[in-house]
């Protein structure tokens, strides 16, 4: 089922009218389609029939408990980058043996927590982390299952802020030193080498960078095995992009991505781990807002809406494009507008010179493909409350994060001891 569609000229998510949700929950709010998330997950698993696999949802893309639980209930594991995320996924019923732990600065206490849970794999990013993990595991008399994140030095052809696989990026160990580092790891106590890991960036819209990186990983696994290491897990990270601009043909499709992986790695008989974030949840989410003011500038017309950059950071941070549509589908009458939020920064702009159905003050609109890196990256900047999140399943909806009160937000501060 598509995440949304118009029925009787009203925008629906599954079989629920967005306007009906908005009658119950003040805008702005995020709204997610459960079946769209499930389908996105199944698009991966149904393709990977010829290899043993584990699809670990990169929860930094959307870490709401209900969203994690939707995926956990249909078998997904989780890729986490902090103790906080690990606690979130455990609480949402992801078993510890389906957790991979990434991130470049795992602290001793985070390592201890992960070892206590018995997670599936640590993805190590440096020799420093290796030494520290060995020491922590030894002190606890536990064994850490590890893979190194390999930096293959390939160009991900994506936005510079989310490109991670070039030698100048801070991530992983250089592929040129991998054999030497694995050799060293094999000598350390309480470390069990099990795999190889790579993640070259996010929102990749071409398969070529993946192909380049994965071929290097295949070669490396063959080399590491000939060096005597027991490599049986290949973690290929996440990064598959979504089609934010609906009129463009996506050329990096899950089906082709999975086919390439199966064909390339089938001979190695490894467990293939994937860590998709965005491609599982982005398209399932809408950000619903109301037009507060329609302001005619000298050259432009601005729709000032009630959500802002603190609610959805992607346009101001990455110059990201999001489709924007009217909740009420009526007139053919369109208009060129700038859609902006209320925050005092020019960067608080969702779209410029966008042709949109003519909207007036009080009308609702939906910012599309907002399910990934939306709520998860939001803040209370300008002392704006974090916005509610709603999960839709067929003709039902449920609030999966409620709006807090201003007292709760302001009450997080304390005056200094000398200020009373
Ligand atoms: C961010 C991240 C992911 C998920 O990336 P997407 O582009 O959302 O699929 C996976 N693995 C690691 C290590 C990451 O940092």
Image (cartoon, helix red, strand yellow):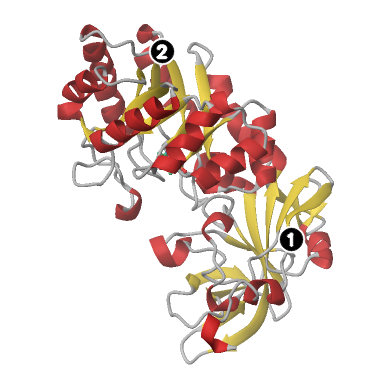
Which residue is denoted by mark 1 in the rendering?
402
| Residue sitting at x 40%, y 29% | 139
Q: Position of residue 199 (x, y in %)?
A: 35, 36
211 relative to 403 in the view: left or right: left
Q: Ligand 1 shows up in which quadrant of the image?
A: top left
| Residue sitting at x 59%, y 47% | 63
For the residue pair 181 and 348, the one nearer the viewer reads as 181
Image height check: is 259 above or below 307? above
Q: Position of residue 181 (x, y in %)?
A: 20, 25
Q: Quadrant of the C terminus?
A: bottom right
50 relative to 73 in the view: left or right: left
Which residue is denoted by mark 2 in the rendering?
270
Q: CA distance from mark 2 to mark 1?
A: 43 Å
Q: Position of residue 307 (x, y in %)?
A: 61, 71
381 relative to 408 in the view: left or right: left
Whether residue 240 is visible here, answered yes or no, is no
User: Considering the numbered disc 2 on the image, is that residue within a helix, a strand or a loop?
Assistant: loop
Q: Quadrant of the N terminus?
A: top right
| Whether the residue under disc 1 has CB within 8 Å of ligand 1 | no
Q: Which mark is residue 130?
A: none
| Residue sitting at x 78%, y 59% | 9
Image height check: is 68 above or below 233? below
Residue 103: which quarter of the image?
top left
User: Considering the numbered disc 1 on the image, is that residue within a helix, a strand or a loop?
Assistant: loop
For the residue pair 270 and 191, the one nearer the viewer reads as 191
């Amino acid at each position: 089922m598509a995440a949304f569609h118009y029925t009787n000229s009203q925008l629906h998510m599954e079989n629920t009218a967005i306007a009906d949700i908005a009658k119950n929950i003040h805008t702005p709010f995020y709204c997610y389609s459960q079946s769209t998330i499930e389908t996105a997950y199944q698009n991966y698993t149904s393709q990977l029939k010829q290899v043993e696999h584990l699809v670990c949802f990169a929860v930094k893309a959307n870490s709401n408990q209900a969203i994690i639980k939707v995926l956990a209930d249909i078998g997904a594991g989780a890729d986490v980058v902090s103790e906080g995320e690990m606690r979130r996924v455990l609480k949402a019923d992801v078993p510890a043996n389906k957790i991979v732990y990434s991130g470049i600065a795992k602290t001793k206490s985070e390592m201890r927590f992960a070892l206590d849970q018995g997670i599936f794999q640590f993805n190590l990013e440096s020799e420093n982390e290796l030494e520290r993990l060995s020491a922590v595991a030894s002190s606890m008399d536990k064994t850490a299952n590890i893979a190194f994140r390999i930096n293959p030095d390939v160009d991900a052809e994506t936005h510079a802020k989310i490109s991670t696989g070039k030698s100048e990026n801070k991530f992983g160990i250089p592929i040129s030193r991998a054999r030497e580092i694995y050799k060293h790891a094999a000598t350390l106590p309480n470390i069990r080498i099990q795999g190889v890991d790579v993640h070259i960036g996010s929102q990749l819209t071409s398969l070529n960078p993946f192909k380049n990186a994965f071929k290097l990983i295949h070669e490396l696994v063959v080399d590491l095995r000939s060096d005597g290491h027991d490599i049986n897990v290949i973690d290929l990270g996440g990064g598959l992009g979504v089609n934010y601009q609906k009129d463009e043909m996506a050329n990096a499709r899950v089906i082709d991505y999975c086919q390439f992986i199966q064909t390339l790695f089938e001979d190695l008989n490894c467990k293939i781990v994937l860590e998709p974030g965005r491609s599982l949840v982005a398209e399932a989410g809408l950000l619903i807002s109301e037009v507060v003011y329609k302001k005619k500038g000298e050259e432009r017309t601005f729709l000032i809406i009630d959500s802002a950059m603190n609610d959805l950071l992607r346009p101001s941070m990455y110059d990201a494009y999001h489709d924007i549509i009217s909740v009420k589908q009526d007139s053919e009458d369109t208009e060129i507008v700038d859609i902006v939020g209320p925050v005092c920064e020019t960067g608080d702009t969702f779209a410029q010179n966008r042709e949109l159905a003519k909207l007036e003050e009080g009308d609702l609109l939906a910012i599309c493909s907002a399910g990934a890196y939306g709520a998860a990256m939001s803040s209370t900047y300008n002392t704006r409350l974090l916005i509610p999140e709603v999960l839709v399943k067929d003709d039902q909806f449920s609030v999966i994060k409620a709006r807090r009160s201003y007292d709760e937000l302001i009450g997080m501060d304390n005056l200094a001891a000398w200020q009373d």
